[in-house]
Image (spheres, helix red, strand yellow):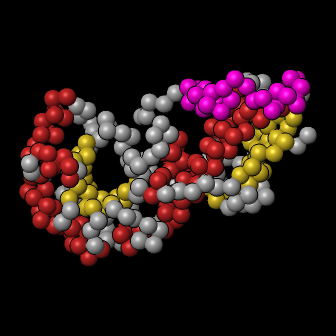
Amino acid sequence: MINFNLDQFIHDALQEDVLTGDITSLACIPENHESKAILKIKEEGVIAGVELAKSIFHYLDPQIKMSIYIQDGSYIHYGEIAFEVIGKTRDLLQAERLVLNSMQHMSGIATLSNRFAVEVADLPVTLLDTRKTTPLNRYLEKWAVRLGGCHNYRNGLYDWFMIKDNHIAACGSISKAIKAVNQFRKKHGPEDAGITIEVKNLVELEEVLRCGNVTRIMMDNFELALLAEGVAMVGKKHETEASGGVSLQSVRKIALTGVDFISIGALTHSAGSLDLSLKIQN
């Protein structure tokens, strides 16, 4: 599980934006003035961050009243209202940008994840995110991936062994890297962490198959024909994974090779923002 303190995140984000005070609202809105605001949907997609918005509003004032009409992970359409919130106007305006920035970004990720998931919904493959996330926002981005219907890979460098090309180069060979990782896991753990090894071609794949002692073999940037051949070579001896430049146009073709997992950096690093707005009603 990612070590994430939600209250600390909200505190730091508000500190960045508000600092010594929202001087415009302080100037023109009385301290005890109350308003209702609504979250309007301006673009079709999958919504994410409603529960985060609730936490943000309640951080500013536990007495704020929020009515949620559309739950996280739901498909949304232009013109719908996701929620309404009633509270002190200054609090609503302080929260506005943090709520919108977070929800628009998370909803963009959830929407893109949903599009990928739909492409392979009838196939026995699991779509995974990667560590290609915004620094300090990994928890929120991986949350959005799940809401969109895809799955999280490792949370960080600490919970899954992944032997990549740089590790192999530093160790001297595939066999040395696999041996070293297994020895470390046995001595230091975590013993329940899986081991993935990245291969660039069928020659490297053959070496991994001779060594064994891995959970999953990641075939990186393989052409489709070679990927299918690699999956057949592995059989059911290890889990198989495809990675590298996966797009909405290619994900189904990759899945049809029979690979067990597909890791997609684009879920987080290439997702846009979904258009939402928070509007004061009175």
> 281 or 145, which lies in front?
281
Residue at 53% across / 63% down in the picture?
Answer: 115
The residue stretch that appears in magenta = 6-32
Residue furthest out toward the right: 282
**Residue 145, x across and y down, in percent:** 50, 50
Could you tell whether 274 is left or right of 149 in the image?
right
In this rendering, is residue 42 above or below 152? below
Q: How many marks?
A: 0
In this rendering, is residue 191 above or below 148? above
In terms of secondary structure, what is the magenta stretch mainly?
Answer: helix
Could you tell whether 55 is left or right of 181 in the image?
right
Magenta segment: does it hold 48?
A: no
**Residue 78, x across and y down, in percent:** 75, 61
Magenta segment: does it hold 8?
A: yes
Residue 88 in view here: no
In this rendering, is residue 187 above or below 147? above
Residue at 47% across / 44% down in the picture?
Answer: 134
Query: Picture quarter containing residue 257?
Result: bottom left
Q: Quadrant of the C terminus?
A: top right
Residue at 12% across / 52% down in the picture?
Answer: 174
Residue at 54% across / 53% down in the picture?
Answer: 109
